[in-house]
Amino acid sequence: MAQDTYMGTFDEVSKYNISLNYAERLWLAWYTYMQNDVLATGIMSFVMHEAIYYGRSLMWAIVGMIPYFQKYKIQSAKIPSAYEQWQCAFLVLLSHVTVELPQIWLFHPLCQYFGLSTTVPFPSVYKMAYQIAIFFVIEDAWHYWMHRAMHWGPLYKNIHKIHHQYSAPFGLAAEYASPIEVMVLGFGTVGSPIIWCCITGDLHILTMYIWIVLRVCQAIDAHSGYELPWSLHHFLPFWAGAEHHDVHHERFIGNYSSSFRWWDFVLDTEAGPEASKRRRERKMASMKKAQ
């Protein structure tokens, strides 16, 4: 039974669901208290997205103010001004409210339609981990081809050029883009789990939430402009990271993938001095063979 307050509902839920862990009881209490699943999911989704996006971006803004980290700035001569960052933050928030909020509000009906579970108990950590790994691979493929298409003349001029306003990106600029681009590339993030659910009939909305949080953090980190010694790329060489995407913004071409480097490597769309050197070496080797 729902109580007058959320914590009152939590206490009531805890009495009769002792088999659930603390997080599961918090989850159940929220939906019980709200008495409206669409509203409960909509509020939770929007607040989660804004908290993660601006919280993670703030972390990189603080890094940018600490002199020690400036030696790790990829394009050291291009430092975004406070005005640029505030302007970007406002325009991204405007996009979130006008473009993404209506879609988030339809998220629960969408989940119900495609069979995503919103109940407790939660799935195991193992199940969530392997499903999220699959989503990363699917989204990366979608992002590569759509992003590469966005660099075709008319699409670049009318849609993608907005995102390239900053040749030296910073965290807040991760979702600074045309509404059309937000929806097209965002389909890879939201569509990958939905496709998985349609095929397997087995997906919990919590798994999707964790996936979206990780994907948002990955996008912000890739736009951070800093290649730190503990960046994931140094431990997973196939991970794209900030260095990979920063070169894309600097040169406006190549390095189209989001999370991994393999599409750019296999299809020879890598950008940067090292990639250019490898192409020259292959060309010279080919010429020698021809002689």
Image (cartoon, grey):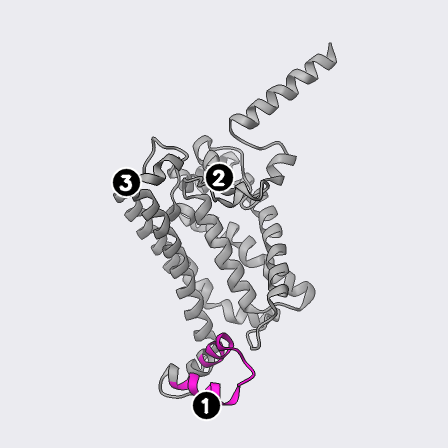
Magenta-drawn stretch contains 156: no
Residue of label 2:
245
Real-space CA distance between mark 1 and mark 3, rounded to the nearest whole angstrom? 52 Å
Q: Which mark is residue 81?
A: 3
Residue 58 spot, x, y in % from top left: 34, 52
The magenta span reads 8-29
Q: Earlier in the sequence, mark 1 or mark 3?
A: 1
Q: Amino acid at mark 1?
A: Met
**Residue 126 appears at what percent x and percent y?**
63, 64
Residue nearer the viewer, 214 or 141: 214
Residue at the location (51% across, 89% down)? 16
Q: Which residue is mark 1?
A: 1
Of the residues shown, which amino acid type is indicated by label 3? Ser
The secondary element bearing badge 2 is classed as helix
Residue name at image x 28 percent, y 40 percent: 81
* Vertical arrangement, residue 214 with respect to residue 238, above or below: below
